[in-house]
Amino acid sequence: MRILHTKPRVACKAPLRICGLILGVVFGLGIWSKSAQAQYATFSFAPPDRLSFQEKHIFKKEILTGLAQPETEIESSETRYDLRKTAQGYAVVATPLQEEPLTESGANLYNALLSRATITYDLDDRGQLTSVRGAQRAYDDLRESLSPEMTDVVFSALGAAGQDPVALVTNLWNGRMILGQYVGRRIKLDTLFKATGDVQLPVGGTARGSIEMFMRSAECPTNQCVQVLISYVSTDQTVADRLGTAMRGLVVGMGHAFLGMLAANEELRRALETEAGVTIDLNTDIDALVPHFQISNARFESENVRLIDTNTGLLHSEGEIQTIKASFGITGQPVTQLVIKQTHLYDYTYPE
C-alpha cells in the first residue's frame, strides 16, 4: 500500500468527504481537524479472555431510481459475542439474540443468515479468520424457513455464490474485520493511504477498484481509539457483470415463484387465465424467456467508518454506505438509470 503524506484538508476531498459526513451524522464526531504534531498508532489484537459483548445491526436498502417509485427496506438484528483464547488465537462465538428477517429482495442475506444460528469464528493471534463453524446449519435453517417461492427469488439472484454458506460468511467477516493486516505495525495518523485491490460487492463477488484509507486519533470509552475511514470505488466490468447476473436471477426467481404459486392455487390460475384470455403453461421455461440485461457505466462506491480500540482491536462503532449506479436496459427498450443504496450501522455494548 502506497502512503501519501497528505494534509487532512486535502484528504477531505472526494471521495472521502462522504466518510466525514457519515461519521459526523452517525456518531457526532469531528473529523478533519489538524494535528499539532505527527501522531502514530500501533495496532494490537488482544481482547480480554472470556469477554462477552453485544452488537446491534441496522440494515437499510433504498432503490432510489430505476423503478416506478423508490423502494425502502429496513431490518435490524442483535448478536451476543463470546470470546475465548485458544492455542491458535481466539474462538469467537456469535449467538443471535434477535432474528433479522430476510427482506423481499434478499439484499440482507448475509445478516439474515448470521441471525439464524450460532456461528463460531476461529481466529489466529492477529485476529485474522482461519475457519468458520456453524455456517451450513444457519444456511439450512434460513432456506427451510422460506417458502419455495421465496427461496427461488433469493437464491436465483445470488447464483452459485449463494450456494456456499461458508464463503458467504467468510467474505462478510473479511470485508469488515480488516485489522489483522495492521497488527504490530506503527501507523502514522492523519495520513491518506491509497491502494488498488479487490472490493467486496453487495451483489456478490469482488471487483478490482481503488481504496483510500485515513486514520486519526479519536475519543472512545477506553480513550485509546482510532477512527478509520475507508473509501472503495470500482468501475470494473465485473461490477456490471455481477449486477446483471443478480438482476436477471431475481427476475427468473420471481418467475419461478409465480408459477409455483399458480401450481398450488388452481382457482387463482383459472381466474387469471379467464381475465387474460390465455392458457398458462406451468412448465414454461422461465430462464429461456428472461432476456439478459444490458448493463453499462456501472460504478460501485462504499464509504465506511470505524472506531477501533488500538490496544484490543475491538470495534466501538461502525457505519457503511454502499452505492451502485448503472445504466441498464433490454434490447429495443429505453435505457434506465439505476441507483441502489445500502446502509449498515453497527453499535457495540461492552461490560463496564
Image (cartoon, rainbow, N blue to C red):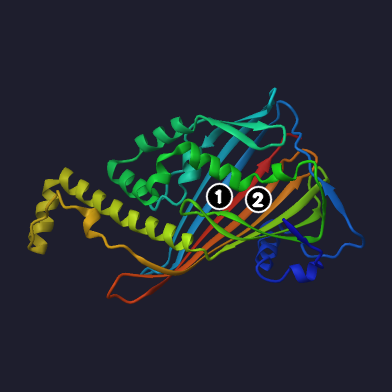
Q: CA distance from mark 2 to mark 1?
A: 11 Å
Q: Which residue is tagged 2? A: 318
Mark 2 surroundings: few (<14), some (14-19) or many (≥20) residues within 10 A = many
**Image location of residue 120, percent across then percent down:** 57, 30
Type of amino acid under label 2: Glu
**Image location of residue 68, percent across then percent down:** 35, 70
Q: Which numbered marker is on residue 58?
A: 1
- Callout in the foreground (2, 1): 2
**Image location of residue 30, percent across then percent down:** 77, 62
Which residue sits at x=11%, y=55%?
A: 280
Q: Where is 68 relative to 1, above or below?
A: below
The quadrant of the picture occupied by the C terminus is top right
Q: Quadrant of residue 25?
A: bottom right
Pick whichever of labels 2 and 1 is earlier in the sequence.
1
Type of amino acid under label 1: Ile
Mark 1 surroundings: few (<14), some (14-19) or many (≥20) residues within 10 A = some
